[in-house]
Image (cartoon, rainbow, N blue to C red):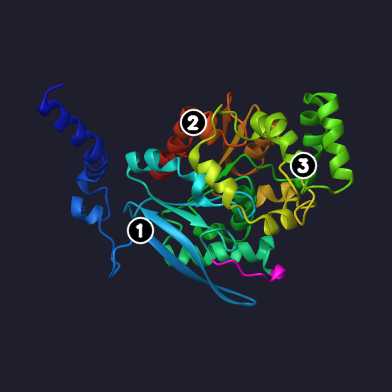
Amino acid sequence: MSLNNLSMMRYVTLFLPVVLLLASCHQNTCPTQVSLADYFTSNDSVEAAGIKMIPVKTPVGEFKVWTKRFGNNPKIKILLLHGGPAMTHEYMECFETFFMREGFEFYEYDQLGSYYSDQPKDSSLWTTERFVEEVEQVRKAIGADSSNFYVLGNSWGGILAMEYALKYQQHIKGLLVSNMMASAPAYGKYADEVLAKQMKPEVLAEIKELEAKKDFANPRYMELLIPNFYHEHLCRLKEWPDGFNRAMKHVNGEIYTMMQGPSEFGISGRLAHWDIKDRLKEIGVSTLMIGAKYDTMDPKAMEEQSKLVKKGRYLYCANGSHLSMWDDQQVFMSGVIKFIKDVDAGSF
């Protein structure tokens, strides 16, 4: 390949997303004139690659949460809500290439208690209601409002996104719920009555025996779950992505167990009785519900949820599992991007 061709490829790779963004702002469709320098410049006195520790007030004091901003787009600001609870933003790094290519402004974010944020020990903090107020404070800090704010939550982040919408949908333009049913009891029932029966009987029996003894610290518990459940229903890629591995390594197990239970195989923590399915009809903003064939969540329930909200759309990932943004990536990302563009254009 000639030097000229190499130079051209580098130009296309580095600057095409910006060129496309600038092109989209012709004929006064963009609120402000954007230059290449503006796009990659923040207003911070010290540049920190978009990373900012945002202060959040809680009933037991003020703490800081980690956020990282990508891009500069006054029309589209997307906040990514990770799962767990108390996983990290790291497994959501896959959005970076896709969203940067589209010129979206988006934020990776570690919720309070997660690895890159403050980790207070007061157990009264770990409630859905308190997390909702945290998201509202983050929204204000990033300058998002009903004209540009998109909330995308996966798993527990989907619970948080739905709960946030029920209280603060006046501030949202688009809601995206990835792989999370609106009823924890229904999620548990699906795990017991559908997914468990797909395991080998002897494997399931040993898992149940360990659970009955509450012997969750036993290495054998995860030795059984990872190949027989996690690789089937959490992430089906033969080799798990680095970001997901880091998130698994960095999970705050104390908070995770307190709220979710000891594993992804059903739910038994503080969230065990959470159920807002009957309240989905109260959500009036444009909403995308994402389900997947091999998910820990019933894909039929995800489709039903898209019909229970007032303005819903369903995205089905036929090859995906709980992390379909990884194992059915092209379908997932294409559907998410189309939804955001349609909402932005006023066509949905």
In the depicted view, which residue is nearer to us: 217 or 334?
217
Give the magenta part as a residue range: 118-124
Q: Give the residue at the far front of this rendering.
A: 219
Q: Relative to 148, say whether 126 is above or below.
A: below
Residue type of the residue flagged with mark 3: Gly
Residue 136 within the segment the image draws in magenta: no
Tag 3 near tag 1, CB within 8 Å: no
Which numbered circle lies on residue 171? Answer: none
User: Of the residues under marks 1 and 2, which one precedes in the sequence?
Assistant: 1
Which numbered circle lies on residue 50? Answer: 1
Tally the marks: 3
Q: Give the crowd class for mark 3: few <14, some 14-19, many >=20 residues within 10 Å.
A: many
Q: Relative to 76, say whether 325 is above or below.
A: above
Which numbered circle lies on residue 329? Answer: 2
Whole-Å distance between the Cαs marked 3 and 1? 36 Å
Q: Is residue 27 left or right of residue 239?
A: left
Whole-Å distance between the Cαs marked 1 and 2? 25 Å
Q: Position of residue 297 (x, y in %)?
A: 69, 36
In the depicted view, which residue is nearer to us: 110 or 176?
110
In the depicted view, which residue is nearer to us: 263 or 99?
263
Q: Quadrant of the N terminus?
A: top left
Residue at the image position 72 percent from the left and 56 percent from the top: 259
Whole-Å distance between the Cαs marked 2 and 3? 25 Å
Q: Give the residue at the far top of this rendering.
A: 1
Quarter-wise, where is residue 314 in the image? Answer: top right
Q: Position of residue 334 (x, y in %)?
A: 44, 31
User: Of the residues under marks 3 and 1, which one precedes in the sequence?
Assistant: 1
Residue 35 seen by the camera? no
